[in-house]
Image (spheres, rainbow, N blue to C red):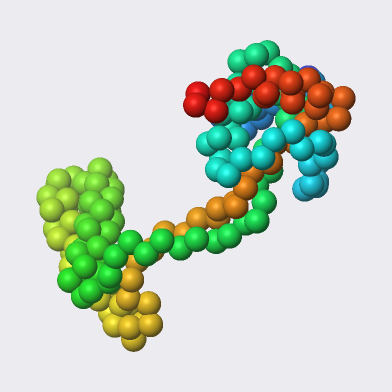
Amino acid sequence: MVRAGFSSTFTGYRRAKHVAVAQTGAMRATPGQQRNLPQAPTLPKGEEIATYENYLDAQRAVDYLSDKEFPVQHVTIVGSDLRMVERVTGRLTYPRVALAGALSGAWFGLFVGLILTLFSEEGGALVPAIILGLGFGMLFGVISFMFTGGKRDFTSQSQIVAGNYAILCREEHAQKASEVLATLNPER
């Protein structure tokens, strides 16, 4: 009897696990497509059918193939000539660091205050927690900036950018893909 209960629980767990994976979108490929995906990181194989200077043009070309009912599961977009680009967005100053630290601390104080308010019989912990979080956030932000010694007193955003994007297609479908892409209007 115990074994039967364990078996049905385990089966229910497996079923729930598959439903959860499907709902989160972790598995986007259909079972037939999964067999074609490599298990380890590998370079894609195929014939280069087009090259574009930016990703949006390459994406537009694949979308065009899809619109023309080409089997796009045989197509890969490969970015080459990768570069790390760091765009400087501003200068860090003590007032800016203090403001950022205060805002971050206030959010943390709000979180702590809500927890304290939920679990206490008296509900007056929210505002003092926000004020304390604001003060400590400002203090820690300014102190940590002071310790950098001006070595990095700017803000920036980094991203990896490719110099060009090639569209590869499996050899058996490359000719048809080239023919379809030849009808793509560059102004589209």
The residue positioned 33% from the left and 83% from the top of the image is 150
Image location of residue 80, percent across then percent down? 67, 51
The residue positioned 79% from the left and 47% from the top of the image is 43
Image height of 68 relative to 56, above or below: above
Name the residue furthest right: 172
| The N terminus lies in quadrant | top right
Judge left or right: residue 147 versus residue 106: right
Query: Quarter of the image holding residue 35?
Result: top right
15 or 26: which is nearer to us? 26
The residue positioned 50% from the left and 61% from the top of the image is 85
The residue positioned 61% from the left and 15% from the top of the image is 67
Query: Quarter of the image holding residue 36?
Result: top right
Name the residue furthest top: 69
Image height of 43 relative to 29, above or below: below
Judge left or right: residue 174 versus residue 140: right
Q: Mark yes or no: residue 57 visible.
A: yes
Image location of residue 53, percent across then percent down? 58, 44
110 or 34: which is nearer to us? 34
Judge left or right: residue 120 versus residue 79: left
Judge left or right: residue 100 versus residue 88: left
Image location of residue 122, percent across then percent down? 14, 47
